[in-house]
Image (tube, rainbow, N blue to C red):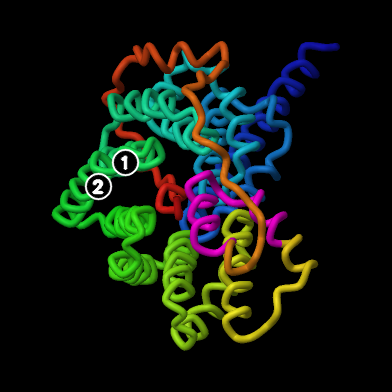
Amino acid sequence: MSNYCLVIYTVLAIACASAVAGDAAATLDEAEAYLTVNPARSIALLDQIADIDTLSPELAIRRYVLLLRAAVPTNDMPRLIQVLDILFNYQQHAYFQQHVTAITSALGIWLRRNNYLHDAQSSFACSYTHSTTERQRLTLTNSLALVARQLNETDKARTLFIAARQMAQQSGQLSVVAMVENNLGMLALDQGNITAAEPHFRAALTQYQAISQRAGQISAGINLLFYFVLQQDVLSFQRLYTPTANLTINFPNEAKQALLFWLHSRFMQLQGQPVTAQMQQQLREAFQLLEDNQVKTLIQRYLATPLAVDVKAAPALSRQSFNRPWFSSVLACNWPVSSLTEQPQQQESEKKPG
């Protein structure tokens, strides 16, 4: 190849690489813009990025972090752990370390959902150490409260929730206020204090509607429907069901859809519709899709008996340890504390029921 041809080839290669990087960056920007209003769209955009292996480390890490943030509200736990396994290959990279709070927070959510509760505490504690914004710290306080709730440390959970709500109210963090209100309502249901749950669910739904946060509206709406079913408030259930169902059906979260199916089945029974053997089998199948053991326990306690469906939440687990080679880095948590401010993270599943 002549020197002239070599120069032309090199220039074209650089131009093509620059164009690919520019296209990928634009897609990443668009995916990030959809995170709050439509995280499923974010995932679709991120999956459209071609030639991932040719991306710079910064763009690749950014793509994976955005996938984590979208996988949480859509409850795509298999995708979440798959992405984490890949991401930790980059843990010595500066861009990874700048986003370590988002990464370890998402890991904590996966660990909690999969009953690695003490390891989840460690992951959230590491996230808190590297947090750079008040919003992150409030969200992580809420996450630690959810772990305490799942460990049946009710007083600790309530104290953390109330502290997070007070700080969020003072700093005007409306989505965090809604998140905590939702979880305080679920804590009330855990304790059998059904009437105390209602104002929390209503407050959460109102806040989520005000900020047009779809995942939050679904979560708080379904929880309020749960309250109406328990109170056998048919009229209120009818009014809220259609808008909540429309959001839920068009949102890719099977756990929320399964919970809604249980609630609607009980509502139809209260309306006089008999529970058929086919419906009972569908309810058993839906039970397996529910988000975690706390939600299953509530369904077993409040709905399974009237619907005559024999289901059981998993028994309390003895302490189990998470086993990944890279998890020792999370336990050590000795990444440099970055002076750069991370993009505020919105791990929206943490406002979930349970």
* 102 left or right of 56 in image: left
What is the secondary structure assignment of the residue under circle 1? helix
Give the residue at the far left of this rendering. 170
Of the numbered discs in the image, which one, if any, rests on residue 145? 1
Q: Of residues 150 and 208, which is closer to you in this image?
A: 150
Above or below: residue 22 compared with residue 332? below
Pointers 1 and 2 in contact (CB under 8 A)? yes
Above or below: residue 170 compared with residue 81? below
| Residue 148: percent from left, percent from top | 34, 37
Which quarter of the picture shows residue 87? top right
Q: Of residues 109 and 183, which is closer to you in this image?
A: 183
> Magenta region, mostly helix, strand or loop?
helix
| Residue 97: percent from left, percent from top | 40, 21
The residue depicted at 44 percent of the width and 84 percent of the height is: 236
Q: Quadrant location of the N terminus?
A: top right
Q: Of residues 133 and 271, which is closer to you in this image?
A: 271
Marked residue nearer the N-terminal end (1 or 2): 1
CA gap between label 1 and label 2 equals: 7 Å
Classed neighbour count for the residue bearing mark 2: other residues with Cα under 10 Å, few (<14), some (14–19), many (≥20): many
Which quarter of the picture shows residue 278? bottom right
| Residue 267: percent from left, percent from top | 57, 77
Amino acid on which the number 1 mark rests in the picture: Ala
Above or below: residue 300 compared with residue 194? above
The residue depicted at 49 percent of the width and 65 percent of the height is: 218
Amino acid on which the number 2 mark rests in the picture: Arg
The residue depicted at 52 percent of the width and 44 percent of the height is: 293
From the image, tell me which residue sits under label 2. 158
The residue depicted at 57 percent of the width and 40 percent of the height is: 314
What is the secondary structure assignment of the residue under circle 2? helix
Span colored in magenta: 283-304
